[in-house]
Every structure is written in C-alpha cells, then in structure tokens.
Image (tube, rainbow, N blue to C red):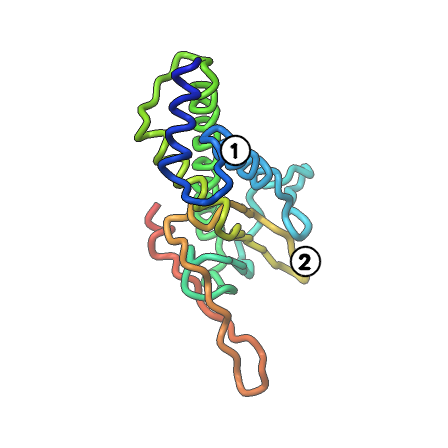
Amino acid sequence: MRVAWLLAGWCSAQSDNSSTTETAAQVLQKWYDQLEKNMKAPPKGDACVNAEGQTGMEQDCSEGCSIQIQQDTQRFGQFRQVIAAGGGPQTLAALGSALDAERVELVQKRRQLTRMLAFLRGEGNDKFSAEEVSDQVSRGRQCLEGVTSRIEITVSKDGHACVYSSIEKPAMMFANPTLAEENPRDASGASLAIPANLSAVLEL
C-alpha cells in the first residue's frame, strides 16, 4: 500500500506544476465522478418511445422522418445543427449505433479508472506502471479542465418530435474534439439547414 501511495505522489509531482498539487487518485476520482454524471445526463427533450412505451427504441421511420442532430463537437460534420438526409430507419439505426459506441467508451473508461483507483489504494489484483498512471492523470486533467460536449439526435414526424439518442462526455474523449461551428445564416438571419456528414456512420 505504501508503494501505491508513493506512486500516486510521484505522478502528481510529475504532471502538475501548480502550487496546489492533487494526488493521482484525487484526479482520477474526479474524472470518474464526471463520467458518471455524464452517463446519467437526461435528454433535453422528451425521449422517443415505441408502441409498448419503451424508451430508446427504433422509431417508425419506414416512410421517412426528419432527423436533426445538435452537436457540440464535429462528430457528424462541421456545424452545430445538421440534418440527416433521407431520414429512413437505416440512417436512424446507424446514428444510434454511433452514439452507442461512444457510450461504450464511457463505460470502459470508468471500468479502467475503477481498477486503477483500486491499485493506487493498495487494493485489487491489477498492476499499473508509473507511466500508465501518469498518462491517465494527464488525460483526466485535460478532460476535467476542458469543455463537456453533448450530441443529441431528434426525430420529427407528423408534427411530433422526440429525442432518439443522446450522449454527453468531455470533448477530449470524442475522436474529433474540435468544437462545432455556429451554422451560417441567410440574409434574414435565419439559421441555414446543413446536411450531416454520415459517410463514416453509414459504413458501420
């Protein structure tokens, strides 16, 4: 246990030049708590439900729906608000799968942090090198000091709109952490509809 805490102190000294130094365990615990909060973040609108009243299920888009994506990072294109062309069930399912994959990363990272925290506390059977711990502390600080990004997919049909899927996590944890740009506007100031970039998603 003494070795684990010496390692925690070594990592904080190596990765933080500020006057107030946090141990590796403190940084990783804060990161873990942030990810847990992200995973519990509710949608900003009413969640879609199927005929049985279950949320998060496939919507009836067999005859086409309007699919809008609100994104803080450039996951599906350059701009903050984009439209998924076609609006069919295949497109909707592909988008849902893409956000499911992003959500799996949150789960996996929390599991890794659980194991690393146990190691730093002298518990569990997992072993981590000083370099591995230092790397995660550095990544954790970047996520904690950066912005939280959200992606939300809204489906509209017959005058009814609902949130099909959404995810929230630190921008640094997205494959492309670049923040989305504000949509261009027309002469009257109205936001222009921009097609989403679904090239990578539809290949899944």
At 43% from the left edge and 37% from the top edge, which residue is drawn?
105
Residue under label 2, please give it.
Answer: 160
Which mark is drawn over residue 32?
1
Q: How would you rate the neighbour count of disc 1 (Cα within 10 Å): few for under 14, some for 14-19, many for 20 or more? A: many
Kind of residue at badge 1: Tyr
Q: Quadrant of the C terminus?
A: top left
Camera-near label (1 vs 2) is 1
Residue 196 can be seen, yes or no:
yes
Where residue 62 sits in the image (x, y, percent)?
Answer: 52, 52
Name the residue nearer the viewer: 26 or 178: 26
Where residue 131 sits in the image (x, y, percent)?
Answer: 30, 30
Helix, strand or loop at label 1? It is: helix
Note whether 9 is above or below 79 in the view shown.
above
Residue 107 can be seen, yes or no:
no
Name the residue nearer the viewer: 59 or 120: 120
Name the residue nearer the viewer: 141 or 37: 141
Note whether 96 is above or below 194 in the view shown.
above
Question: Of callouts 1 and 2, which one flags the residue occurring earlier in the amino acid sequence?
Answer: 1
Q: How would you rate the neighbour count of disc 2 (Cα within 10 Å): few for under 14, some for 14-19, many for 20 or more? A: few
Which mark is drawn over residue 164?
none
Label tally: 2
Name the residue nearer the viewer: 43 or 127: 127
Where residue 106 sits in the image (x, y, percent)?
Answer: 47, 36
Q: Gap in Å between the C-alphas at discs 1 and 2?
A: 37 Å
Helix, strand or loop at label 2? It is: strand
Kind of residue at badge 2: His
Q: Quadrant of the N terminus?
A: top left
At 46% from the left edge and 62% from the top edge, which residue is drawn?
180
At 66% from the left edge and 41% from the top edge, which residue is drawn?
51
